Amino acid sequence: MVVAGVTIYVDCSQRLSKNYRNVPTQLFTSGSVLLLAVLCGLIAAIAFFGTDPNGTGYIDKLLTLNIDNHYVRAIYVGALVLVLIRSKLFQFQGSDVGGEFFYNLGSQKALNSVVLRWLEWRDAFVEQILSRTFSDPNYDTTMFGFMRAIAQVTADASYRSDIESQIQQIQQAKPPTPLSAADPGWQLYHRTVTRMTLEICGTRPFKTYQ
Amino acid sequence: MSRVYEIVRKAGRIPLNELVLRSSQSPEAVTDELRMLTADGLIEVKGDIPPVAEMFTRGGDTLVMLTSKGFSANTA
């Protein structure tokens, strides 16, 4: 059950990181992700009773298992819970029936709740840190450096060019007036730089401003 | 995929003036794209879209965000 729960967390984390790379791990403690992990863990626990040491049980055949040791078999069933859920369990009126539809529905709801928590957290973080960013006259240059460094180690060429293009666009909008925390133009500039840095690099670049 | 949508997709939710700042398009072009994406049901705009001349000053009160359809497409 524990292995299945971890498998679900890993699956959710991987799907989320495709578009939201820096969601803090503490946001994964969302109740909906926990509920999904527990439900899938229960499915794996029940499925374990459909196995036997000789590999002749229904679940053994479904997962092509033939493992004598109970503990190792339990770990395998837990790790393969997504295969189990996505398997065609039976046919009804010519259509395949399995758990994938329900898993996708549940996992999307769980991920949406994590993303919404991340957006609320991120917006609050931006507002909380904004005034402190004006203490550094090179704030924007430093943050652009972090963003470029992260983009350069990414394999995705279109992502790299997209980041560079956005950075250049933002740089063009830098206010020509002296740095001022009270100037709305500077506030917009620093807010944009901060939000984009959070999206690309996470919170690490802000350690000196916290 | 449109540039505006790509930025909103990665940001999840973003004030309109920041969106215009980050896109390489004019405020008019961004507004047109927002209308199309809203019609497709992928994003929603919370608040009024201000006139182009006031986009940077008043656009911070307007939020552009993914709809649940947009979120689901993002995490599928």
Image (cartoon, coloured by chain):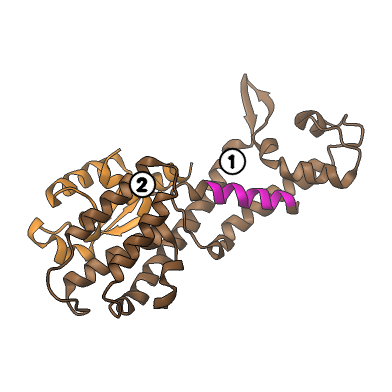
What amino acid type should be assigned to the residue bearing mark 1? Answer: Phe
The chain painted orange is B
Of all chains, the one bearing label 2 is: A
Q: Is residue A13 magenta?
A: yes
Which chain did the image draw in brown? A
Main SS of the magenta segment?
helix
Residue appearing at x 39%, y 51% in the figure: A151
User: Which is more toward the observer, A204 or A145?
Assistant: A145
- Find residue B41 and report its horizontal and vertical position in percent: 31, 43
Bounds of the magenta segment: A3-14
**Can you identify the residue that label 1 sits on?**
A102
Residue at image mark 2: A160
Whether A171 is drawn above or below B68: the answer is below
Residue A5 in the image: state x and y as whole percent.
Answer: 69, 52
Residue that protrudes farthest toward the top in the picture: A94
In the rendered image, the vertical position of residue A178 relative to residue B60, given as above or below: below
- In the displayed structure, A67 sits above or below A127; it is above
Q: Residue A35, labelled with which disc? A: none
Can you give x and y, in whole percent of width and height, for residue B25 in the image?
Answer: 17, 48
Number of residue marks? 2
Kind of residue at badge 2: Arg
Q: In this rendering, which labeled residue sits more in front, label 2 or label 1?
A: 2
